[in-house]
Amino acid sequence: MATMAVPSGGGDAAGTKGGDTKRATRALQALNFSMADMQAGIGPFLGVFLQQRGWQTGPIGTVMTAGGVAGMLMTAPAGAFIDHTEKKRWVVVVTGICTVLASFLILWSQTWTVVTISQVATAIAGAAIGPAVAGMTLGIVRQKGFNAQNGRNQAWNHAGNMVGAGLSGWLGWKFGMPAIFYLAAGFGVLAIISVLSIPERAIDHRAARGLEGEGGDDDAGGKAEGFKVLMRNKPMLILAAALACFHLGNGAMLPLYGLAVVGAGKGNPAMFTAMTVVVAQAVMIVTSLIAMKVAAGRGYWLVLLISFAALPLRGFLAGTFIEYWGVWPVQALDGIGAGLQSVAVPGLVACLLSGTGRVNVGQGAVMTVQGVGASLSPAIGGWLAQELGYHVAFFILGSFALASLALWIGFAGTLRPACSPKHDGDGDGDGGEPQPEAAR
């Protein structure tokens, strides 16, 4: 069990410490389950919701991109803030409230201005949630326990997405699309309750930023390095570039496939959109747990290689079969790609930056670069579909991951040592020592 920086006091203190850690990890899992629908429950349904109100694919993709760009610009600063603040729980509370309130704007009005403001506000508010949860996890279980706990967090997150999507589909079919927005608000309340259930004393805020020292002074765990540590870490730069290319193609796939099938009259809008999410998230639950095991034994390189390879095949299938049953193979491949990355990317970043004190700003920086691709993808996919048709759009989107594969295989000599399990810190504060060599 990871050691916490709490006041010493004999057996009672040790018992309290262990109890706090156990309670905190359970609350983390509940938080990941409930915040999943709060973050993504509305997103997959937004396209068909607007399509029903006369919007075309190009403008739909553009407003999604506006939100993506806003979130992208805020993610790195949010990560830096998480590294410095000891109010990580309250960051999640505030962003959760803002996300839910901003989403309700769409129910009030579906004009271009209101929808765009809602998406931008939601993205800005949610930019800190990912780094905050990753930071709290690292602060509770330390580097040694991060891979395993992050794998469990992601499994619960995908389970929350699956349950939320299933309920959204049923509620949308039974009561209409607006019911989905109310469900997301309910999950937001559960997320706030869950994060407040994490004992504040269970979070070691030095460990949360990648400094493993036991004491309260800088010398105990080293001082935080400057931001230039991110730019001179070669594996980090390659990872970011590969992820940007992947998400440039992947970001538009889910909403665009829903629009294609529903637009062809081959599925109920709410139920089919829910199915696209449920299938992907069900697969992600399994793949996130597998990724945790494979990363511990074989390292992160193989896990990410498989994730990148899933997208070209997904694009080919989506472009070939625009049918109701196509959701199964198309979204299963989404589950494989995204499920593997949900564990491997945060784990690898925490590993590469262990000991620098910049773990969360690193998480934010990588999420920012991912966001470059993910935010541009809906606009690219939407206009490709409008001008060239859905089939061509899916083929082009899937091909973007070929660049990710080229980077990952081409720099394998640099990446394999950095992604090795031996770099996944041993929890004693020395986990970051080998990293500068791998980073050069």
Image (cartoon, grey):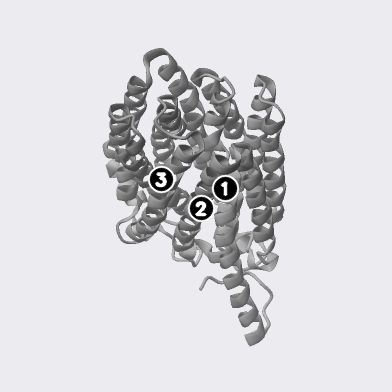
Viewer-proximal residue among 269 and 103: 269
Whether residue 436 appears in this view of the structure is no
Q: CA distance from mark 1 to mark 2?
A: 8 Å
Residue 391 pos. (x, y %): 33, 22
Label 1 and label 3: CA atoms lie apart by 14 Å
In the picture provided, is 363 more to the left or to the right than 94?
left
Q: Which residue is mark 1?
A: 37
The nearer-to-camera label among 2 and 3 is 2
Where does the image place residue 317, in percent across and percent down from the top left?
A: 29, 33
Q: Are marks 1 and 2 in contact (CB under 8 Å)?
A: yes
**Mark 3: amino acid:** Ala
Mark 2–mark 3 Cα distance, whole angstroms, equals 12 Å
Observer-nearest of 187 and 224: 187
Packing grade of label 2 (10 A; few <14, some 14-19, many >=20) is many
**Residue furthest to the front:** 174
Q: Classify mark 1: helix, strand or loop.
A: helix
Residue 117, position as x, y percentages in the image: 68, 27
Earlier-in-chain disc, 1 versus 3: 1
Q: Earlier in the sequence, mark 2 or mark 3?
A: 2
Residue pictured at 55% horizontal, 53% vertical: 134
Q: Is residue 185 above or below residue 4?
A: above
Q: Which residue is mark 2?
A: 163
Residue tagged by mark 3? 280
Under tag 3, what secondary structure? Answer: helix
Residue 349 horizontal/vertical position (percent): 47, 48
Residue 330 figure quarter: top left
The count of marks equals 3
The residue located at (33%, 20%) in the rendering is 392
Q: Amino acid at mark 1?
A: Asp
The secondary element bearing badge 2 is classed as helix
Q: Along the polypeptide, which appears first: circle 1 or circle 2?
A: 1
